[in-house]
Image (cartoon, rainbow, N blue to C red):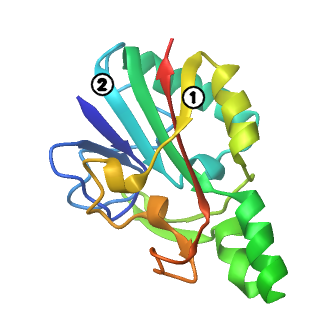
Amino acid sequence: MKIHLGYWHRYIPDWVHVDLCDMEHIDYKTDISDLSCFDDNVADIIYSSHSLEYFDRLEVVDLLSEWRRVLKTGATLRLSVPDFKKLIQVYEQTDDLEKVVGPLYGRMEIDTENGKKLLYHKTVWDEKKLTELLENNGFKNVRLWDWRNTEHADVDDHSQAYFPYMDKENGLMISVNIEADKS
């Protein structure tokens, strides 16, 4: 089983989709912190692109525990989050706060089964802190991954976020794409 968490209108064929938003392709319409719809040790991979930052640094520990519960031993947790270090570079290059406000604060209004909900990013990450988080919460073999080498490479999500926008050949990647295995 392959589980895709919290990415709104993006659809990956043959994956199970979980998100709070009310869209036709979502298999389980629930907060991604609650995977009670799944048994223990059933997923081969969980993928979440730009949703971890919607949880603060205390909430994320319980979140990872829940995701880890669903993963099989040795299975992969694949994450993509805005890269704080790269966003600082963008700001330094442009001296334009507007270029980094979106990835830093992530204001998003979504339609849920219970009406509209407004979401904001609650924290930022870089490769070092995300690696520490994963290693301290039951994951091993933490490594970067390249969106081009995944079965979802044709799904244009934020794992492919560049500055300038969509300059995937010459731009600066502004996401940390990191994965780890359940120990």
Q: Residue at x 40, y 43 (%)?
A: 30
Judging depth in this view, the residue of 61 and 168 nearest the camera is 168
Judging depth in this view, the residue of 96 and 11 nearest the camera is 96
Residue that label 1 marks? 142
In percent of width and height, residue 7 lies at 41, 56
Q: Residue at x 31, y 47 (%)?
A: 150
Is 152 left, or right, of 8 in this rendering?
left
Q: Residue at x 45, y 64 (%)?
A: 160
In percent of width and height, residue 122 lies at 73, 54
Secondary element under disc 1, as helix, strand or loop, is strand
Type of residue at label 1? Answer: Val
**Extreme-left residue of the structure:** 14
Q: Residues within 10 Å of mark 2 (few under 14, many from 20)?
A: some
Quarter where residue 22 is shown: bottom left
- Is the N terminus in the top left, top right, bottom left or bottom right quadrant? top left
Type of residue at label 2? Answer: Asp
Is 95 left, or right, of 23 in this rendering?
right
Judging depth in this view, the residue of 110 and 171 nearest the camera is 171
Is 12 left, or right, of 161 in this rendering?
left
In percent of width and height, residue 82 lies at 63, 59
Q: Is residue 174 above or below residue 2?
A: below
Residue that label 2 marks? 44
Q: Is residue 52 above or below residue 155?
A: above
Secondary element under disc 2, as helix, strand or loop, is strand
In this rendering, the label closer to the viewer, 2 or 1: 1
Tell me the distance, in whole angstroms, between the alpha carbons under discs 2 and 1. 16 Å
Q: Residues within 10 Å of mark 1 (few under 14, many from 20)?
A: some
In percent of width and height, residue 95 lies at 84, 87
